Image (spheres, helix red, strand yellow):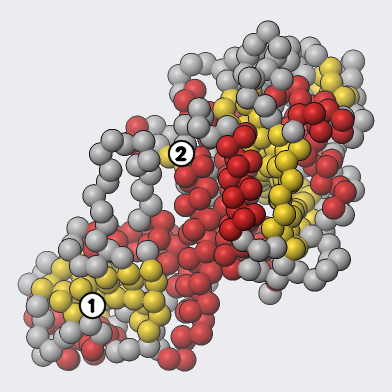
Amino acid sequence: MEFVVKSAKASTQKTATLVLPLGDDCLLGSVAQSVDSASGGALSTALKRGDIQGKAGQTLLLHGLPGLKAERVLLVGIGKVDELDNRQWRKIANAALAAIKGLGGADAAFAMQDVQIKGCDNYGRTRLLVEILADGQYVFDRFKSKKADPRALQKIILLCDKSEQPDVECATREASAIASGMAFTRDLGNLPPNVCHPTYIAEQAKQMSKAYKGLKVDVLDEKKLRDLGAGAFLAVSQGSDQPGCIIVMQYNGGKKGEQPYALVGKGITFDTGGISLKPGQGMDEMKYDMGGAASVLGTLKAVLELQLPINLVCLLACAENMPSGGATRPGDIVTTMSGQTVEILNTDAEGRLVLCDALTYAERFEPRAVIDVATLTGACIVALGSNTSGLLGNNDALVQQLLQAGENAADRAWQLPLFDEYQEQLDSPFADIANIGGPKAGTITAACFLSRFTKKFAWAHLDIAGTAWTSGGKKKGATGRPVPLLTQYLLDRVN
């Protein structure tokens, strides 16, 4: 999908479909009024028929209006103009896209300059619109014998006032990169686990290093990890015939010697639970357990496309959690890369085991801040559902920056407590720490476990178990979250 920004008048724009906003009670904004005048009142005449009232998400398609260069005009209801927020804006953009998709035109022009969204300026409004439109065009049909019909819509023209053009162009460029990262994340998540295993993800990382300048990739295989003492990571990977690895990706777009930011992603490409076997129902969705690593890769792709002036380290802890004669048993004790010992009471709490060694490895880069991203706990879905990611950390400034980034990117997180009292649930009579803390506060105790390995840097943990994918039926699929949140955080650090 190509996005083009123009400061042309809506009434003179040549396009297959001109998209105009319509307020509640058929209220026309100034741009729509100018189009109405140019067409000799054709919009007003159509509205008198009562086919649309302007409620949010309503659409009305008009053909062949006189005095316009547009072949069609699509009126999109935006509801009460003083109540429009990000959630409504998403509904409106999706409704417009759904109407346009069914048409034969190769392009569409959006004239939404009049629209005002609570808490959003021109940049924010445009960026969210472009992300929604680009993401709405996503199709995954790689394994379908009959591919999806070729999409006729190839270009979106964004009309704006000349004074707004720099902001709109910046928003469009950044949104396009974020949408590209989200699509990459969704592709990785939607791939079947017999294709997308740790070696495949490592190959994708190497391909990225060839495609973008300033990116260095190193793959720590199981031999290297054994030499490093990554006993917790290897306890997970040893049950599978697929070898695990930690993929280290360094992007040096900032000043030489400047401390990097670090993103650490959980990359369990399939999670059976190991010896603590999961129930069979819905287990196919455990291919999405690498959503953290996929979102880190997607965020890196957005950063690379924008060539942000920042230093960034991405660590992908990739393994497959399988039951076998060589798998870790409940009750086994392992030594982590940090030297701390862990009693593994449940092999299905494996994400924290691969992450803890990756977090320890991150120390060598002396990062400004470390954010780990993981589909870590079902408890997070119980607490927050599928709309909001869980957020915990040891540095309040970092947590607040991420919360604000989530608000600005319409990809929200919510902070949960990390009080010392919860740490006691991880006590073990035989090792330094147990890998589970019992049935209570599962998301928090998982973060408490990770916090034992983050003493040397500012750290935050994003639990995306509820937001990384949509479950069930034809709607099942990866979402691409939290790429917008993470990219916004990095954009904020640059700006």
For label 2, count other residues whose C-alpha is less than 10 Å away and answer few (under 14), some (14-19) or many (20+). many
SS for callout 1? strand
**Residue 362 image point, x, y percent:** 82, 46
Relative to 271, residue 206 above or below: below
Q: What's the amino acid at mark 2?
A: Asn
Which one is nearer the viewer's eye here, 319 or 115? 319
**Cα distance in 3D space between marks 2 and 1:** 35 Å
Relative to 339, residue 361 above or below: below
State which quadrant residue 349 falls in: top right
Relative to 261, residue 4 above or below: below
Q: What's the amino acid at mark 1?
A: Thr
For label 1, count other residues whose C-alpha is less than 10 Å away and answer few (under 14), some (14-19) or many (20+). many
- Where, quadrant-wise, is the C terminus in this rendering? bottom right
**Residue 14 image point, x, y percent:** 23, 82
**Residue 418 image point, x, y percent:** 77, 42
State which quadrant residue 200 falls in: top right
| Residue 233 as seen in the image, left or right of residue 112 | right
Residue at the spot of label 2: 190
Which one is nearer the viewer's eye here, 288 or 54? 288
| Disc sitting over residue 15 in the figure | 1
